Image (spheres, helix red, strand yellow):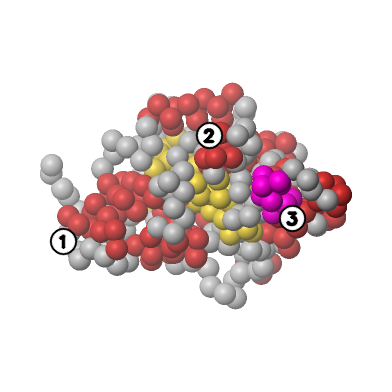
């Protein structure tokens, strides 16, 4: 291939003109609906907002799933990881969250939450299916889809999350609210590993390069709640990580868990038992979301997590013997 220098740093189109469109990692439309109308261009890699420019998370971001909103609440400007094996419903939670914003966004207030969905290394048929689901629910009108499919070169799969983030930052920096979903970051890490090994960089654990932590930290730090002086906008991130056989202690999962403000753990066993979303409440946590939870929800669910933990403990004992005391039977 013939390679030419452009003499400029990589940038992508951003703005409200992007809403309802499907673009590739460089912001070029791939939905067959012609070129983009008026838009500005933003750098793909920028520094995350500093400490002074931020504010603590205090506004709720409703997913519409009671299990999430009650037990692991998410606030605007938070980073909440969705982690689990393949086919446990990680993408389903993310898509449900986008669809749930329809009700809020139809009011046309300043509370409108724009959504950016970044598909990394997914099948084209999966992306097409997602576009269909969103358009049928009229949710595409407040969403942007960035797709770097499985057949795209590794550099594009590596770049896609940063491009999507730049598009989401337009809303954050202009006093609006946005949600960005990275589906999924383990595929981005694999693409980055491929690039690094070809560039002869020394491999580390699981053959990933030494700076794979920085790869994700510099991306997720850009999701933030802005202070009132800088417009009070927010960018909420829902990164997705796929585990192998439920191993949360692998290299990439532990890295991303340490960067994010909590995680929602999904389990295959719960999924097959018909508990959907298959959230393991014991392992799932939201570190900052409780401050953003609605007061009514907080009153109802205050002691819920403790009761669930007590129930699980007693249910484990109940398997050993049938003659249980009255207090245990009441709890069950």
Q: Determine which residue is flagged by label 2.
A: 20
Q: Please tell me which of labels 1 and 2 falls first in the chain.
A: 2
Q: Residue at x 29, y 54 (%)?
A: 192
Residue 313, relative to residue 90: is it above or below? below
Mark 1 or 2, which is nearer the eye? 1
Q: Residues within 10 Å of mark 1 (few under 14, many from 20)?
A: few
Percent position of residue 77, x then y: 61, 59
Mark 2 or 3, which is nearer the eye? 3
Mark 1 or 3, which is nearer the eye? 3
Closer to the camera in the image, 285 or 154 = 285
Per the image, label 1 sits on a secondary structure element best described as loop
Q: CA distance from mark 1 to mark 2?
A: 40 Å
Q: Which mark is residue 200?
A: 1
Q: Residues within 10 Å of mark 2 (few under 14, many from 20)?
A: many
Q: CA distance from mark 1 to mark 3?
A: 52 Å
> What span is in magenta?
311-321
Q: Residue at x 52, y 25 (%)?
A: 132
Q: Residue at x 40, y 26 (%)?
A: 125
Q: CA distance from mark 2 to mark 3?
A: 46 Å
The answer to if 312 sits in the magenta stretch is yes
Q: Determine which residue is flagged by label 3.
A: 310
Placement of the N terminus among the 4 image quadrants: top left
Percent position of residue 79, x then y: 56, 57
Q: Please tell me which of labels 1 and 3 falls first in the chain.
A: 1
Q: In terms of image quadrants, where is residue 56?
A: bottom right
């Amino acid at each position: 291939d013939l390679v030419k220098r452009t003499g400029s740093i990589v940038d992508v189109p951003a703005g409200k003109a992007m809403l309802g469109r499907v673009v590739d990692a460089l912001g070029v439309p791939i939905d067959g609906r012609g070129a983009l109308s008026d838009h500005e261009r933003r750098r793909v890699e920028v520094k995350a907002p500093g400490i002074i420019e931020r504010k603590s998370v205090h506004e709720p971001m409703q997913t519409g799933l009671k299990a999430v909103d009650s037990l692991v609440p998410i606030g605007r400007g938070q980073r909440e990881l969705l982690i689990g094996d393949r086919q446990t419903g990680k993408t389903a939670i993310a898509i449900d969250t986008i669809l749930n914003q329809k009700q809020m966004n139809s009011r046309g207030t300043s509370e409108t939450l724009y959504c950016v969905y970044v598909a990394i290394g997914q099948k084209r048929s999966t992306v097409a299916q997602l576009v269909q689901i969103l358009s049928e629910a009229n949710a595409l009108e407040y969403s942007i889809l960035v797709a770097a499919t499985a057949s795209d070169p590794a550099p594009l799969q590596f770049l896609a999350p940063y491009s999507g983030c730049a598009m989401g930052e337009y809303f954050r920096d202009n006093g609006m609210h946005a949600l960005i979903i990275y589906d999924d970051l383990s595929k981005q890490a694999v693409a980055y590993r491929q690039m690094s090994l070809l560039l002869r960089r020394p491999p580390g654990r699981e053959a990933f390069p030494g700076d794979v932590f920085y790869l994700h930290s510099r991306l997720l730090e850009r999701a933030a709640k802005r202070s009132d002086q800088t417009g009070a906008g927010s960018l909420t991130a829902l990164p997705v990580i796929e585990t192998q056989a439920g191993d949360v202690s692998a290299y990439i999962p532990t890295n991303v868990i340490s960067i994010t403000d909590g995680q929602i753990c999904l389990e295959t066993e719960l999924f097959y038992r018909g508990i959907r979303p298959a959230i393991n409440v014991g392992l799932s946590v939201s570190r900052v979301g409780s401050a953003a939870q609605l007061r009514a929800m907080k009153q109802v669910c205050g002691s819920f997590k403790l009761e669930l933990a007590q129930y699980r403990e007693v249910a484990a004992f109940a398997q050993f013997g049938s003659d249980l005391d009255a207090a245990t039977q009441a709890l069950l």
